Image: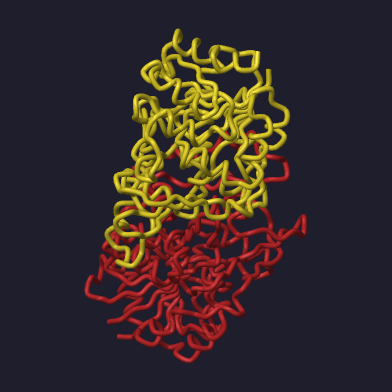
Chain colours: A red, B yellow
Amino acid sequence: MNITVLCGGVGAARFVKALLAVEPGVTVSAVVNTGDDTELHGLHISPDIDTVIYTVAGAIDPERGWGLRDESWTAMRSLERYSQVRPSDSSAAPTWFNLGDQDLATHFYRTARLGEGASLCEVTAEIAQAWSLPIKVVPMTNDRVRTRVRLRDSDSVIDFQEYFVKHRHSLAVSEVTFEGAESAAFVGNAELEGSDLVVIAPSNPIVSIGPIRAISGVDERLAARRDSVVAISPIIAGAALKGPADRMLSELGLKSSVVGVAELYASICGTLIIDSADADLASAVEATGMRCIVTNTIMGKPESDHALIQAVLGVVS
Amino acid sequence: MNITVLCGGVGAARFVKALLAVEPGVTVSAVVNTGDDTELHGLHISPDIDTVIYTVAGAIDPERGWGLRDESWTAMRSLERYSQVRPSDSSAAPTWFNLGDQDLATHFYRTARLGEGASLCEVTAEIAQAWSLPIKVVPMTNDRVRTRVRLRDSDSVIDFQEYFVKHRHSLAVSEVTFEGAESAAFVGNAELEGSDLVVIAPSNPIVSIGPIRAISGVDERLAARRDSVVAISPIIAGAALKGPADRMLSELGLKSSVVGVAELYASICGTLIIDSADADLASAVEATGMRCIVTNTIMGKPESDHALIQAVLGVVS
C-alpha cells in the first residue's frame, strides 16, 4: 500500500515511525511543512523536515523531540560572546534558537546545496538518503513560504520561529498567515496521486498542516479524494500533547476540541480518528460530515500504536 | 606611538602579539588582508582577520597557528555523512576546510551581521571587542576581493583557499590575481594617516600583502611616506617559516630570498629588516634602495622579540 502523510514536526514524525514499525511493508511518502523554515546565521533551517528525518532514522533526541541525540552545543555556547557586543538594533546570531553541533552539518549541507542551485526537494532527498531513510521525504514546496503570526496584544506580526521558540508560544495569537503560499507550487502532487491513502498526521492543524493547505490546489486535490483521506486529531481531551495547538484554536475563535479539528478538516478528509478520551464527542464529529473512529491515539506503546495504525489503514482496506 | 601593521595571517598575528608584549604603550591598528576570505556552507569566513584576533586575544591554537585552542570538531565530523550522498557535480559542504565548533560562532556572527547590512569593518570591530582586543582591527576593504591562483600545470584558475588548504599549497603557481581589487575601496586610510610608523608584517608578500597593495591608491600612499614604512622579511635563509611564500616567489620568477622581498617592497618601504641568517645579503638588499637592518626575526622568545621590536620602532625614533 502507498501512503502519503501530510506532516508537521514531532507528532507527524512519531506517527510515521509508528506506521513503519507496525506495517514495515507499506510505502510511505512524507510531504512536510516548510512554513516554519527559517534563516539563521546564513543557514537555511528546515525544522519539520529534520524532525521527520531524524525521527524515522532513530537519531532524534527522544527527550527534546527535536535535534539529534548525544548532541553537543559548543557552537551555540560560543555565540554568547557575540551577543554581548552586537549593536542594540541588531538581532544577529541569536542564541534563542538552539542548533546542536552535529545538527549543524545538516544545515551546512542544505545551505550549500541550495546555494549551488539545487531545489529543496533534491536536497531533502539527499539528506534522507544520507540517513538511509526507508521513506520518501518531500518538502511541501521548493518555494519560499513563511508562516507569520500576528500577536493579539501588540498587533505586531512576527516569524513563526520567533513566536514558537523565542517566546515559547506563550503569546496570544490573533491571526496566522502563510507568506508566499499563494504563489508557491506544491511539489507533493505525484505523492498524492500515487497514494492509496492520505494521512493528515496528528500535527497542529493551523501552523503545521495549515501551510500545506494554503498552497493553491492542495485542498481541492484532497477534497476530490476525500474518502481516502484520514486525519488523526492532535487534540486529545481539549489539549495538544505538545505545542500550542489547543490555545491557538481558541485564540483564533475555533473550538479547542476534536470537533474544532473536524470542522477544519471536514471538507478535505473523510475520516477523523479521535482518542478514546474523546469518545463522547464522536457524534459531534460525525455531525460535521466526517466518519469518526475512536481509538487510543497516544503513540509510543506497541499495542496502542498497532491499534492506531490498523484504524488508519482500515480506512481504505 | 601610533603604529599601523599591514597584516596577513599567522606571521602578522605573531608580530602584533610580540609588539604588544614588548611595548604595551603603543597604539596599534592592524589592516588585514581579506583576499583569502571565502564563503562556505553559506558562512562568510575571514581567515586572516580571525587569526589576528584570536592570536592577539591569546585564544589561538598554538600548534596549528589557526583556529581556537581546546577546539572540538563535531560539526565537521558530522558533515562527512553528507559527503557521501552529494551529487558528483556538487562540491557542497566540503570537509577539506576545517571549521571548529567554537570557531563557528565567529562565522555565524559575521555572516548574520553582514546579512543585516553591516560592513565588514563594523563587524570586525565588534568581533575584536568581543575578544577584548587592545588593538584596532580593520579589514583592508569592505568590498569583495578574492585572491585567485593560476596553476602552472593545468592552467586552471582556482580560489586561494582551494589552493592553500585543499591542495595544501603543493601545486605550482603561474599567476596570482586579486579579483575585485581594482574597484575595491581601501578602508585603512585613516589608520595610515594617523600612524607614525607603518609596518609590513612578515607575511607572504604575494598573497597576504599583495591583495592590500592591489587596492588602488595603497602603494601610492605608502610610497609617499616611504621613510616611515618598515617591512620584516618573511623569508629567512631562502625559506618561509610557514606557508608557500618561498616556492611561490620562485614559481613567479622572483628571487626566493630577502633580496626578492626587497625588490617587491623597495618602492613603498624605506627599511627592510632581515634575519641574522641573511646578514650576507644586506648589501644586496641595500642595492635595491632600501635601508637594511639585520637582527633575529624569528618570534617567540622574549629576548629576540625585544630586539626585533626595538629595531622596528627604531626606524622612526
Closer to the camera in the image, B6 or A136: B6
Q: Quadrant of residue A164?
A: bottom right
Q: Position of residue A237 (x, y in %)?
A: 52, 62
Outermost top residue: B303
Q: Is residue A150 above or below residue B205?
A: below
Q: Is residue A248 above or below residue A262?
A: above
Outermost bottom residue: A224
Q: Is residue B260 above or below residue B167?
A: above
Asked whether residue A62 appears in the rendered view, the answer is no
Closer to the camera in the image, A275 or B92: B92
Q: Position of residue A266 (x, y in %)?
A: 54, 82
Q: Residue at the spot x=42%, y=65% of the render?
A: A12
Q: Quadrant of residue B140?
A: top right
Q: Residue at the spot x=68%, y=63% of the render?
A: A251
Quarter in which the N terminus of chain B is drawn: top right
Q: Quadrant of residue A146?
A: bottom right
Quarter in which the C terminus of chain B is drawn: top right
Q: Is residue A75 left or right of residue A165?
A: left
Q: Is residue B265 above or below residue B227?
A: below
Q: Is residue B213 left or right of residue B155?
A: right
Q: Position of residue A157 (x, y in %)?
A: 71, 61
Q: Position of residue A258 (x, y in %)?
A: 53, 70
Q: Is residue A273 left or right of residue A55?
A: right
Q: Residue at the spot x=31%, y=81% of the render?
A: A2
Outermost front residue: B287
